[in-house]
Amino acid sequence: MTLLYFAWVRQKIGKSDEHFDLPEQVKTVDALAEYLRARGAGYADAFSDMKRLRAAVNQEHVPFDALVKANDEVAFFPPVTGG
Amino acid sequence: MIRVQPDDFDVGAEVVALTKGRTDIGAIATFTGHVRDDDGLKALILEHYPAMTEREIARHVAEAEKKWPLLGVTIIHRVGRLLPGAQIVFVGVAASHRRAAFEACEFLMDYLKAHAPFWKQEECASGTIWVEAKSSDDDAAGRWR
């Protein structure tokens, strides 16, 4: 899958996108965030408080219990502040 | 028409473009957002999620078209570094009558604020900070449900 990070999530993780091989046991956005949290200090920091995060799967806003599949594009970002 | 661009835009030209060659339009409502220099702000830096932005805005335009009989919609959102006084966002709505134009314009702006994937950073003398989302923006979008 492709993982995308925006705003301070991108800054904390230190990259804007990456390829990621989805482990079979990871089925939801929440589980994915939990898995990524263990990858290093930047990830742990970015995913420390899920209340401050939002997610999109294949460019649509989703709740954290949404399902993820191996070829999805999953994005993590703070609540939007456009306009 | 939906455009996300670093460049400035001309509100007058956008209104002309909405009405060009049409005689059925009775009302145009427009909203233009500007950068304010609150608390010594030097600039706003806007980033977005390109693939998702236009899709998300197009979805909101389609929703507005279901709610009101609209004859044209233009949405422009700028990205990049913008100085105080600069235009950030434009929503222009054409309809036969004013009520639909006013309401759809406000609806689109509320939805842009609450859902379109843009993020603002404030550049001040002391550095840059990410703008926190306001729950009042979610409330504003929620009242249209």
Image (tube, rainbow, N blue to C red):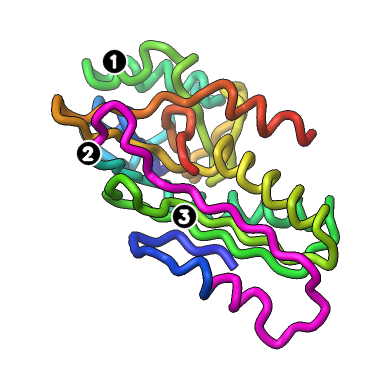
Tell me the kind of residue under disc 1: Asp
Does residue B140 appear to the left or right of B38 in the view shown? right
Give the magenta range: B14-42
Does residue A27 appear to the left or right of B68 in the view shown? left
- Provide the chain ID for the residue under circle 3: B
Relative image position of residue B78 (x, y in whole percent): 40, 55
Residue on which the image places disc 1: A45
- Provide the chain ID for the residue under circle 1: A
Residue on which the image places disc 3: B77
Please name whichever residue, B33 or A49, is drawn nearer the observer in this view of the structure.
B33
Q: Are marks 3 and 1 on the same chain?
A: no
Residue A41 part of the magenta-drawn span: no
Relative image position of residue A83 (x, y in whole percent): 49, 43
Residue B32 in view in this figure: yes
Tell me the kind of residue under disc 3: His
The residue positioned 51% from the left and 23% from the top of the image is B134
- The residue carrying pointer 2 sits among few (fewer than 14), some (14 to 19) or many (20 or more) residues within 10 Å by Cα, namely many
Q: Are marks 2 and 3 on the same chain?
A: yes
**Label at residue B124:** none
Which secondary structure lies at badge 2? Answer: loop
Alpha carbons under labels 3 and 1: distance apart: 31 Å
Is B57 situated above or below A45?
Answer: below
Is B112 situated above or below B140?
Answer: below
Alpha carbons under labels 2 and 1: distance apart: 28 Å
Does residue A71 appear to the left or right of B101 in the view shown? left
- The residue carrying pointer 1 sits among few (fewer than 14), some (14 to 19) or many (20 or more) residues within 10 Å by Cα, namely few
Please name whichever residue, A49 or B122, is drawn nearer the observer in this view of the structure.
B122
Relative image position of residue B52 (x, y in whole percent): 51, 50
Residue on which the image places disc 2: B42
The residue positioned 30% from the left and 51% from the top of the image is B80
The quarter in which the C terminus of chain B is drawn is top right
